[in-house]
Each structure stands twice: as C-alpha cells, then as structure tokens.
Image (cartoon, rainbow, N blue to C red):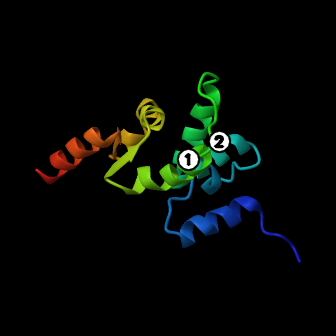
Amino acid sequence: MIAKPFSREAGDVCIRLQLPVPASLRTGGWAAGILPAIKDLIASVPSARTWSTLRHLKHRDLNLPWEQHDWTDLWTLSVAIPYCDIVATEMRWSHLAAVSGLDAHFRTTVVAGGVALHEALCRALA
C-alpha cells in the first residue's frame, strides 16, 4: 500500500469539509514551502486560526503568566470568537482578540465584563 502525499490528503479533507484549499496545497508547493502551507491550512480553519493566534500572543507576553483555567478559556474562545456575534471574556483575552485583529476579522464583538456585555447586547438589539 502506498500512502497518499500529505498535501493531497489535506486537500481532500478541506474539500470534504467545504473549506477553501490553501494555495500552497493546490500548487504542489507543499514540500518546498512547508511552513507557508501549514500556516495557510491553519488560517483556513477559523477555530484553528483563533486558537493558534491567541496561544502565540499569550506565550509571547512573559508578563502574562498562564493561570489555572487559561487552557479552557483558549479552547472555548477558539470556537466562540469565529462563530458568535458577541463574546464576553476576561480583559486579557479581550485585549488579545483586539490586538490580533481576530475580532475584526470574524466581525465579532469581544468584550470584558458584565457592563460591556450589557452595552454590546443593547447595541445589537437596537
């Protein structure tokens, strides 16, 4: 049995899931440019893009230590930000969503705190 090249297999998965096939996979440039191909693939899946972006920013800031429930927050936000209209979370995650541009990219209002959530809901319902 001969294994299918990864680029073809990944392309098949994208087609099955009705996702755009990343350009580097379509052009066969997988072996020559593996890093761009991986970045394209991650960027094409909204939850993966959100997870990797927030995780990268969280690790980059050494003044922001990981806390007990940060992994749970990260996994939850990786689905909520791309697929919800309004997301309420802690200030640190709200800030990371804003500086990364994830909120604008997915057209999601990401707020921190109950008052901001109330205001966002009132604006959405107006």
Q: Nearer the viewer, residue 36 or 46?
A: 46
Q: Residue at x 42, y 34 (%)?
A: 91
Q: Is residue 49 visible?
A: no
Q: Residue at x 16, y 48 (%)?
A: 122
Q: Report how far apart the C-alphas of labels 2 and 1 lie in the structure.
A: 24 Å
Residue receiving disc 2: 36
Where is residue 42? Give x, y as percent: 59, 50
Q: Nearer the viewer, residue 19 or 85?
A: 85
Where is residue 79? Give x, y as percent: 48, 56
Instruction: Give the label, 2 or 1, closer to the camera.
Output: 1
Where is residue 100? Give x, y as percent: 47, 33
Say which amino acid is labelled 1: Leu
Helix or strand or loop: what does disc 2 sit on?
Answer: helix
- The answer to whether 81 is drawn above or below residue 97 in the figure is below
Q: Which of 86 and 69 is in front in this view?
A: 69
Residue receiving disc 1: 74
Q: Residues within 10 Å of mark 2 (few under 14, many from 20)?
A: some
Where is residue 19? Give x, y as percent: 50, 62
- Name the quarter where the N terminus is drawn: bottom right
Helix or strand or loop: what does disc 1 sit on?
Answer: helix
- Quadrant assignment, res 98: top left
Q: Which residue is drawn at 71% across and 50% down?
A: 30
